[in-house]
Amino acid sequence: MSGDHNSQHSGEKHVTSYAAYFFVWFALLMLTVITVVVAGINFGNYTVATALFVASIKSYLVLTIFMHLKAESKIFKGFVGVALFFLLISLVLLFSDYSFL
């Protein structure tokens, strides 16, 4: 059984180019600048939502490119999805409690 697993993945090699890494690095820098600018501007209730939206885009880029999640198996992607789902539930519960204070 483990021989099948090794033979299945032995021919696969995930290679990401330096250009892709540079593009993602530059995008992360620009998104960080956007986060800082948004923090300086008072959008009222939308400031935190905008910061969280930009942070989620940055997290997606890091997960898919730097952590090579795009090349992982479906079961591993499922585990990451379940973890993100419970994080989302926690954030919804946190902000719903915070909104009633």
Image (cartoon, grey):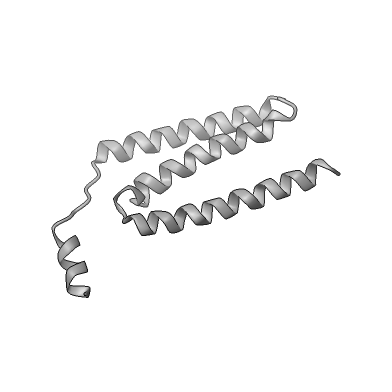
- Horizontal placement of 85 versus 20: left or right? right
Taking the spot 36% from the left edge, 51% from the top edge, the residue there is: 69
Taking the spot 61% from the left edge, 27% from the top edge, the residue there is: 37
Q: Is residue 8 above or below residue 93?
A: below
Q: Position of residue 80 (x, y in %)?
A: 45, 55
The quadrant of the rendering that contains the C terminus is: top right
- Horizontal placement of 51 versus 20: left or right? right
36, 15: nearer the viewer: 15
Taking the spot 55% from the left edge, 51% from the top edge, the residue there is: 85
**Res 6 quadrant in image:** bottom left
- Horizontal placement of 33 versus 40: left or right? left
Q: Position of residue 93 (x, y in %)?
A: 71, 49
Q: Position of residue 50 (x, y in %)?
A: 62, 31
The quadrant of the rendering that contains the N terminus is: bottom left
Which residue appears farthest toward the right when viewing the image? 101
**Res 61 quadrant in image:** top left
Total marks in image: 0
Taking the spot 52% from the left edge, 56% from the top edge, the residue there is: 83
Q: Is residue 98 above or below residue 39?
A: below
